[in-house]
Image (spheres, rainbow, N blue to C red):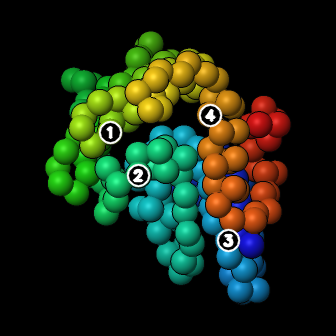
């Protein structure tokens, strides 16, 4: 039985949510339970973030975007951040261990504030796997390529599909109390 702690994202700062999940992981590990932290947003630096927040705690982490990219990013990634002349991030380029481009995040700025962005994840052959279109830091639409077919869906539909796939692999208990209401419903 796996215990899945769901979070939209896990930030560098030790927020109340991330602290609660960190402590739950610690308790479940002490009870020798199979626990996994599950996140949904596209952040290729999650392993580094977890190490910074809880360096003494081993945790299995599953990110939805990494799940769908699979072997393309096995072994880890590195991020190349490009800034404008005012040192505001405008593009993050993500490379795998073979130095192949596997993802890009473009930031749209209004008065130096990110108001929109697009995240693109690539397959091993360089074709698009997922495109996330954001408005005001929320995913407004998902373009998802599966078996050569484009599916346009909401982010909650993608999350629902992902959770169905991973819970079908092994009996699971899902803990979803650290999500926004819309994500909890998904």
Q: Earlier in the sequence, mark 1 or mark 3?
A: 3
Q: Report which residue position mark 1 lands on.
A: 123
Q: Nearer the viewer, residue 1 or 43?
A: 1
Check the image and name the residue furthest to the front. Answer: 147
Task: Locate residue 37: give its quadrant.
Answer: bottom right
Q: Give me the C-alpha separation between circle 1 and circle 2.
A: 9 Å
Q: Earlier in the sequence, mark 3 or mark 4?
A: 3
Helix, strand or loop at disc 1?
Answer: loop
Q: Quadrant of the C terminus?
A: top right
Residue 5, position in %: x, y? Answer: 71, 59
Tell me, for residue 146, which label it has, or none: none
- Within-10-Å neighbours for mark 1: few <14, some 14–19, many 20+: some
Question: Do labels 2 and 3 touch, CB within 8 Å?
Answer: no
Q: Give me the C-alpha separation between circle 4 and circle 2.
A: 16 Å
Q: Report which residue position mark 3 lands on.
A: 35
Question: Do labels 1 and 3 touch, CB within 8 Å?
Answer: no
Check the image and name the residue furthest to the left. Answer: 99
> Looking at the image, is 135 positioned above or below residue 29?
above
Q: Earlier in the sequence, mark 1 or mark 2?
A: 2
């Amino acid at each position: 039985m796996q215990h899945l702690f769901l979070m939209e994202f896990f930030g560098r700062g030790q927020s109340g949510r991330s602290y609660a999940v960190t402590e739950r992981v610690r308790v479940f590990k002490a009870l020798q339970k199979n626990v996994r932290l599950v996140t949904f947003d596209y952040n290729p630096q999650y392993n580094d973030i977890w190490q910074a927040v809880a360096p003494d705690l081993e945790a299995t982490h599953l990110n939805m975007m990494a799940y769908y990219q699979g072997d393309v990013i096995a072994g880890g990634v590195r991020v190349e951040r490009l800034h404008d002349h005012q040192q505001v991030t405008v593009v993050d380029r993500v490379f795998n261990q073979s130095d192949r481009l596997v993802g890009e995040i473009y930031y749209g700025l209004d008065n130096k504030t990110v108001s929109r962005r697009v995240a693109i994840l690539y397959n091993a052959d360089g074709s698009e796997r997922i495109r996330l279109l954001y408005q005001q830091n929320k995913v407004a639409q998902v373009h998802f390529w599966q078996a050569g077919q484009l599916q346009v869906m909401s982010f909650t539909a993608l999350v629902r599909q992902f959770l169905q796939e991973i819970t079908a692999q092994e009996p699971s208990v899902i803990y979803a109390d650290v999500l926004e209401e819309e994500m909890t419903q998904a």
